[in-house]
Amino acid sequence: MGIAFETREEMTMASLDGLVDISSAAELKGQLLTAVDSGKPLRVSLEAATYLDVTVVQLLWAAEKMARASGVAFGFDGTIPAPLLAQLAEAGFTWVQSSVVAG
Amino acid sequence: MSSRGSSVSNAKNADQFKQSFREEAREILVDLEAALLELNADRSDAELVGRVFRALHTIKGSGSMFGFEALAAFTHNLENAFDEVRNGRLEVSAELIDLTLASLDQIRDLLEEREGGADAAACDQLLRRVRALAGLGPSPQASATPAGSQTSAATLPQPGGERVRSWTIRFAPGAETLATGANPLLLFAELRELGGLAVKASMEMLPPLRELDPERCYVAWEMVLATAQGRDAIRDVFIFVEDSCELAIEPIEETDSLGPSAADATALALKEPRAASGGRRTYDKPDTAASLRVPAAKLDQFVDLVGELVTVQARLAELAARRDDAEVAAVSEEIERLTSSLRENSMNIRMLPIRATFEKFRRLVHDLARDLGKEVELTVDGADTELDKTVIDQLGDPLMHLIRNSMDHGIEPRAQRLACGKRAIAKIHLSARHSGASVLIAVSDDGGGIDAEAVRQRGIEKGLLSPDAQIGEAETFALIFQPGFSTAKQITDVSGRGVGMDVVRQRVESLRGSIEVASKPGAGTSITLRLPLTLAIIDGLLVAVGEACFVLPLATTLECIELSAEDIAQANGKHVAHVRGEIVPYIRLREHFGITGRRPGLEQIMVVETGEGRFGFVVDQVLGDCQTVIKSLGRIYRHVQAVSGATILGDGRVALILDPERLVQDAIKAAGRIPGSGPRGHPAPSAEDLRPRYGVRAKA
């Protein structure tokens, strides 16, 4: 459970695993900033995530905004688990689904 | 903020929010208990059923939100049972009320997270019984779902035909909400239990990633809820975050059901731009915005500081009086005026209505009536009467003992009551009212009354009275407050050990109060506690006797009249004065306190109102009014009854604050040869000598 960032030649891959909440928020912010600042496309995988709290959703949203403003590609990679998608939808965070770039 | 510093701060915040939840939940539990007891009296009252349900629902939902998962799971079962009642599938019965009351005790334990926690076996057994009674199936585990669970059929609130209204809800949690460990998303699950809900998160307030504090909450939500519930039920969902969030709840339209129109309204509302207030969120919490929760310790500290200010102001006034400087005098007067206002305000902040204290005894009466096999109705009068929080905090035990005593010894068994031509249902009445600087709190019953002869005989047996002692009824009744005194033939679980009434006496004395007992055989007993309104700062009148200064509470002082040598001669040696045709007995403080020195030719009588009637205190000189900070005399002087404390005067001298009630009672006691002694330095006069002088009143 937690967060992992992998810098590849063509992009940065961020993977969120299990329950990710405020306890990881500070670390996640730092990693997202580094990734966007690198100028490489940023992909976020939620495939193994089971729960994201509000702090995490806020960071992902802000990262997407920053990436777009910097001309850096941003998207959610892979399939978002249905329970997580439902949880995000119930909380009104529908933008996550619209940012999925690959199934 | 470093990660370590941040987690320490988060833990502290979370503890504060948990504590805040506890405080709110305690209040809800008190209200819940009162509602259950009212429901027991009127089992068909749907409004009360709704009140109970909502309270359980709130405790469950908010408990889960603040991490009290076990509490939430336990309460969920009770909530389901009362949902069955709401939907007409379960009738309110004595068993349901008793089980729910017993469950509330367990919820209290779960809430406090006491060492060892709540009694798990008792919780389990209670849940099984509640579920069996409500027909909810046998497995508590299966139903012990925390509040975050999705809407279940059992909790859907709208039976067919109810009017459904759509509401827009704008909710922006406080910035620190997430750092406290609270999860606002759980509130949405609760809202879904009220009806159909559409949610849209608004990220407008989010700063750029670089500036974003990862632990703050920037998100706000706009929701549309279609429900048959009213605004209060919706607001209840937010009750524990209401003080720290922005919340607006507005109706959209009414529909007949959760049909298409509600869905349309939802879609429409969520597409609408933010409220017409130029993008600023609106506030919709008039009730809570007007009040603030402050720890009692902070309030005590504040009042202590005001007390110190009053003392310094007295020094300034003294200094101004000595200097012939108009400017200093003007500043001193201004400071005095402001200090006086500040003192009054700080005292008012500490004043609380006695309602909560009274209401909690409904449960005691209910449980005792059941245990004793008696039918007892508790009535309350003057519950809005306010008195100092410190006094209220000390009142619980004495009132409990008085009620237990009434229930056990005062109120007769049903058969006996019927045989006497009384109603089968006995009555205990709690009342409160102001009387000058005192508040009178009475516990009355319509039981058999106190057997004065039995009390007297017991007093003789215990050596408190000599067999030939001639004492009045009031003095006889006073014996029941002696340690170990009991006329009960049997010691029961409830009372009879002679401890309770002693506790009452001790506690009331420690509050500088007094007790009056009135009882009539066969008709009942009324015990009245006379307590001071406040224990901190009072308005007083400063008087001098010889070199000594005393303060008399202004609130009990009626007037000041002169006592000349001629008046004394006309009274034929009796300590009485004629005040506009009324004979007022008086106590000469010089004699009472054994103060030596020469009496002035013209003395002053301070006429005061006491529970025993009007009395005078003769002093040498009246120095004027003063704000008086009451300082305790400490343990060494705790048995000095006629003095309620001391205060420091502007010139640094100490003045004793007199308790007129006690002074008069001491004098009466001395006159009647009740256990006690005469005035210091004087042999106790005979009752015959002093009775007319002090006008002893026997109460019956």
Image (tube, grey):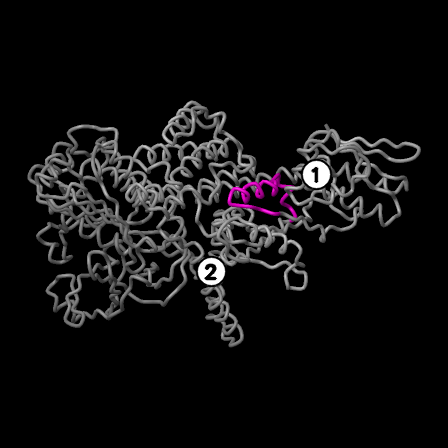
Residue A94 counted in the magenta span: no
Q: Amino acid at mark 2?
A: Val
User: Where is mark 1, residue-wise?
Assistant: B5
Question: x, y percentage for residue A43?
Answer: 83, 37
Foreground disc of the pair 1, 2: 1
Give the image location of residue B385, x and y in percent. Answer: 33, 55
**Dot 1 crowding, Cα within 10 Å, few <14, some 14–19, many 20+:** few
**Relative vertical location of residue B536 with respect to residue B30 in this rendering, above or below:** below
Measuring from the top left, give residue B656's x and y in whole percent: 35, 55
Q: Chain of mark 1?
A: B
Secondary element at tag 1? helix
Element under disc 2: helix
Horizontal side of B443 relative to B195 (left or right) equals: left
Residue found at x 50% / y 56%: B254
**Is residue B196 highlighted in magenta?**
yes
Give the residues drawn in magenta, as a range: B175-198
Q: Chain of mark 2?
A: B
Q: Nearer the viewer, residue B426 or B160?
A: B160
Residue at left offset 36%, top offset 46%: B46
Q: Is residue A64 left or right of residue B671?
A: right
Rate crowding at label 2 as few (under 14), some (14 to 19) or many (20 or more) other CA atoms within 10 Å: many
How far apart are the two marked residues, 1 and 2, measured between alpha carbons? 41 Å
Identity of the residue furthest to the right in this view: A9
Q: Most extreme residue toward the top, as rendered? A: B121
- Choose between B610 and B133: the one closer to the eye: B133
Query: Which of pointers 1 and 2 lies earlier in the amino acid sequence?
Result: 1
Q: Quadrant of residue B37?
A: top left
Per the image, the residue denoted by label 2 is: B310
The kind of residue tagged 1 is Gly
Residue B575 occupies quadrant: bottom left
